[in-house]
Amino acid sequence: MRIIAGKYRGRRISFPAHIRPTQDKVRQAIFDVLAGAVAKARVLELFAGSGAMGLESLSRGAASACLIDSDRRSTNAIMRNLEALGLSEEGREGVRVYTNDAFRALKVLEKKGERFDLVFLDPPYHKGLAKKALKTIASSGILAPRSFVIVEHAGTDDLGDVPENITRFKEADYGDIKVSFFQMRT
């Protein structure tokens, strides 16, 4: 797996064996839809796995990235990926990696007054986590005005009713995978 575009284009991303990484074609399609929204964005990636979406965002000019996963193997892989990109601890200002449950992390981020312009969700499939995370984020206060939430989920996973403060503006199918795009209403 490689970073598709930007400053780190072509650089390899490693991932732990237990995760399902987002396919290159799906990542490319997501970033094509987001276009100019990535530059200078404050990015949150929950259920980060390898951190591919956050790393791709940084490569494309995002201002900062917060990558969260509950599995230590995943956050260790993210740290190795940062090192491989030359983002040592001293040189990665604005990049934070946490091993934490996504829902606990959201509470902490909200309590700290954090706001994000771009949120990526790719939770384990068929567990209702995509629906729960979307609703939690929409009601949490961590979304900046006009921010985007991108949810990668199984095509059979139902996200339920869309919370009132966000709008689903696009949905795309990639075989068994579905990507739903939301934007915070102003």
Image (spheres, rainbow, N blue to C red):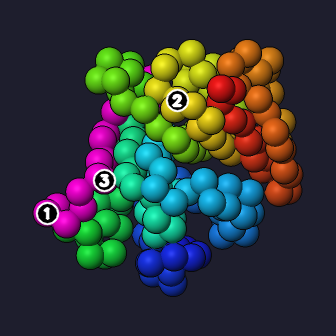
Quadrant holding the N terminus:
bottom right
Pointer 2 residue: 143
Q: Mark 2 is on which residue type?
A: Leu
Q: Which residues are magenta?
A: 89-105
Look at the numbered disc 3 and give the secondary structure of its residue.
Answer: strand
Residue 104 belongs to the span the image colors magenta:
yes
Mark 3 vs mark 2, CA separation in Å: 18 Å
Residue 53 belongs to the span the image colors magenta:
no
Pointer 1 residue: 90
Q: Is residue 130 visible?
A: no
126, above or below 17, in the image: above
Q: Mark 1 is on which residue type?
A: Glu
Mark 1 vs mark 3, CA separation in Å: 10 Å
- First in sequence: mark 2 or mark 1? 1
Quadrant holding the C terminus:
top right
What residue is drawn where x is 55% and y is 24%?
Answer: 137
What residue is drawn where x is 17% and y is 61%?
Answer: 89
**3 or 2: mark nearer the eye:** 2
Mark 1–mark 3 CB contact (< 8 Å):
no
What residue is drawn where x is 72% and y is 64%?
Answer: 32
175, above or below 131, in the image: below
Q: Position of residue 78 (x, y in %)?
A: 36, 58
Pointer 3 residue: 95
Q: Quadrant of the rendered structure where residue 21 is?
A: bottom right
Q: Position of residue 110 (x, y in %)?
A: 38, 21
